[in-house]
Every structure is written in structure tokens, then in C-alpha cells.
Image (cartoon, helix red, strand yellow):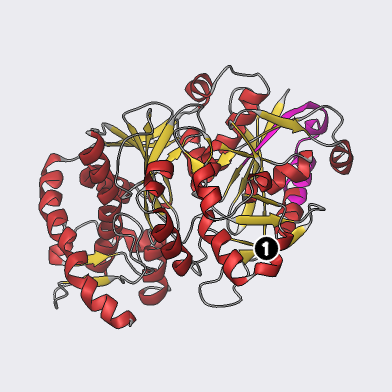
Amino acid sequence: MNYVIGLDLGTSALKGLVLQKDGKVIATASSEYPVINKRPGYSEQDPDEWIKATNNVIKSLLDKIPDLNTNIEGISISGQMHGLVTLDKNKSIVRPAILWNDTRTTEACKKITEKMGKQLIEITNNNALEGFTLPKVVWMQDNESELWKQVQHIMLPKDYIVFYLTGKLSTDFSDAAGTLLLDVEKGKWSKKILDTFDINDKILPTIYNSTDVVGEIKESIADIFGIKNHVVISAGGADNACAAVGSGIVTKDKGMVSIGTSGVFLTYEEESHTNYEGKLHLFNHAKKGSYYSMGVTLAAGHSLNWFKNTFAKESSFDDLINNIVDISPGADGLYFSPYIVGERTPYADSQIRGSFIGIDTNHTMGHFTRAVLEGVTFSLKDSQQLMEEFSHKKFERIVSIGGGAKSDLWLQMQADIFDAEIVTLSTEQGPGMGAAYFAMVASNWYDNLEDCTENCVSYGKVFRPNHTSVDQYEEVYATYQKIYRYTKPICHDIQK
């Protein structure tokens, strides 16, 4: 039996899974690590914690599968996007990695926008937002100039694990696209951006396709694990691109909705020149020569977690959601806007805050729960609507993954609000599954990702829109869309 390993470097833990040639998952493992929050808005991690987690996960998988050490053929990695990892001339860590959810870079974003103007969207297809990598570089130049002088290499989080395993400095197109340093259409680092912000192109890694082999596992690392054969390490990909591949989103007219702490609505794009005017992200996909557009709700599952922990701590999620069964779409006039930590799409507003609108004495816990679920789903529909408006897409089928795919009631709500067939995966292992598919292609098990996903991706439950509910939600959603406009000035005043 031959195997590949897919690793998923998340914000709180590294997860690993082992696949055999038919795509069946035969073992999983995970290892947690801390986030460093030195000040409000700061979010950092020690990259060496990722290495410890990698060692823990691979050793755990080896313990579970007796012949893994002699029959593993490939490893690939999915990773949290945008984080800034800095190394010195000796390839030692200069400072803790600044993560995607770090918000210290607001002034740096303003500086980037002022210097680049419209050219930034023309080159990268994205606006300067706090999460991206370039604002972190600019912040470091302005606030840690002595440390910046030591920096000889920068990379993304998952690339540090590839470096550990192979000794090679690399990244892939899907992760590079989230830096604001890549010319998305030309597929190379942008000389204009690098020159504008005095960044030497020699500190940037070589860019590969996700399925390209960067190198083989180093002998010294193989010895640590007791691995006996040659193992190829492919470049891997950004977590959202990997999740899309793991869900079979490698052809047009399919969408993916992922509801975790944050929420994502994503679709495949064959071309890079769809002009979303910066209202949606457009990145290089993990599939060679393709792209994906994406909208983000900052507090998707986080809104439900917050609501439960604040108002129904003793209830289970199942009990909470089951309370909505007899409540009609629109929660009898109760609305929730999920802006509890600000919002990304379509407003990119760090000062907006959430609200319940329309509360009256007839509303019960079930009404509030339904309003939260609807508000989160409406926020993701904002992204769907932008895709349909700007690129004239019509989504017939949407793959739902994450926490939002664990409740039949919520899945039916998604079908009704998105007015599309919602399908789940029969086996969902998150972005790590997409990474494992890269390893399969890199190990020559398949010629390309399309063949791999066609053979390996298996769908589960199907939820079709109820046309009566679809009509009801069209009216409710039209009212929901007014909430941002009318609460924005109040929230901005409060933040002042």
C-alpha cells in the first residue's frame, strides 16, 4: 500500500491526514500551538511551534500506520494565508510571524493605497487590507527598522514547513497571490510594487505551482521520522485554495461556502481580468493557470459561538438550532448583522459592529438563533451577489463545508437563501484534503488535479431550494441589505 500525507497549518493547530490511492483517509492527527497577543490587535506565532507540531503529527501518523515509513511517497501542505515569516542571512527566524488576523497595519494600508493608487488593483486584483502580507512588511519597515535590516528572506507560514522538510525556499501561486506583491496575471513578483516599497526581489522565494515538486525530504529529517524511502514535497497551497480543491472546485459554475470562525464564499475563475473593483478578492488558484474569486465574512461561525456562549451557554448547538424549526424565514421581523468584529466583504469596514434589529416581545430564543443563522448566510450571499453581478455567474450547485455543513436545518437555509442546490462532502477533512491531492499529483498518481478530484471527491447530502422560502428570503434579504447603510454612521461614532 502506498500513501501520501496532507498537512494543514491552521491558526490554532496543525492537522495531518494520510490518504491511499483511492482517496480514502486512513489516519488523522493534530497538534495545537498558541497565538501570541502582546497588544490589542496583535496576532503572532513562533514558527518553531509549527515545526514542533509537524514533528508531532508526522510521528503520530507513523505510529498509527506500521508501513507508512516505507511506503509514503509524497507530502504537501495547506497553510493559513498572508502571514509574514522573516529569516536572516543564516536562515534563522528574525521575529515571530505576524498572522493574517493581525490588525496593526491600518496606517500601512493607507500608505500603500496612497502610493499605488489604482495600480494596486490593476496588478494584484485586490485592495490593501490589514490581513495581507505587504502591509506587514511596510509596518515592519516603519516600526522595526533595525529588525527589518536583518531580513534576508520572507515567506508565508506553510512555506516555512516546506523549508524545514526540504531546505528549499519556495512558495506557490495561490499563497503568493495573497501577499499584495504578486502580479496576478503575469504570474511573477511585481517589480513596480517591490520598487515602490524598497523591497529587494532576492528576499522573495521562488514561486511554484501547487503540485510542483520543490524537493525531497532531507535525509536528516527522514532519519528523525525513521522514513526509509524517497519522499517528494510539493509546494502546497493557501488554505482556501486547498479547501476548494478538496471540494472539487476546479471547474466553472460551482461555488463553495465555508463556515468556520470566519466565512468564505468562493468560486472558480478561468481568467484573471474579471474586474470586481476590489469588492471581492481574486487570487491565483492552486490549479495551474486558473483563479478563484472570494468574499469573506469575518464573523460567521464566530457569531454563532458568541451568541451561544453569551446567551445560551448551557445549551448544545444542536438544541439551539433545533429551536428554529417552527419559526418562519425572516424570524418574524428579527434581523442580525454579523459585524461583531468588523466586516470584510463587501464593505471592508473595521469600525462597523453587529446589531439585532426589530426586537419585540414576541421574539424567543429560537427567533434570535434563526436571526443569527440568517444574518451570517445573508452576509455570505453578499459575496454571491457580487459574483453574479460582475461576472454574470449563475450558481446551480454550491458545496458547503465547515460548521455550516453540520446542520441539516442550516444547510436547507443556505439552499433557500442562495437559491441553489447545496451539497455536502461525504468525507470532509478541510484544506488538508486538497494538500493531499497535490501530493498525489506530485507523486504521479494522477496527471492533474481534475483527474484526481474526479476520482477522489465524493459528495454526500443534497439540499434543494424550497421555492416558497426562496421568495420569502428575497424580501427579507432586501431589508437586511439596508442595515449596513443605516448603522454605519452610528457604529463609526461609537468607535470614535
Q: Residue visible at 76% across and 51% down? A: 56
Report if residue 191 is visible in the image. Answer: yes
Magenta segment, which residues? 55-77
Q: Which residue is mark 1?
A: 148
Q: Quadrant of the N terminus?
A: top right
**In this rendering, is residue 307 above or below 21?**
below
Report if residue 430 is visible in the image. Answer: no
Q: Main secondary structure of the magenta part?
A: helix
User: What amino acid type is highlighted by mark number 1?
Assistant: Trp
- Helix or strand or loop: what does disc 1 sit on? helix
**Residue found farthest to the top:** 447
Question: Percent x, y for residue 490?
Answer: 22, 78
Q: Residue visible at 22% across and 65% down? A: 484
Question: Percent x, y for residue 130?
Answer: 46, 62
Snapshot quadrant of residue 141: bottom right
- Magenta-span inclusion, residue 58: yes
Snapshot quadrant of residue 442: top right
Q: Is residue 401 left or right of residue 61?
A: left
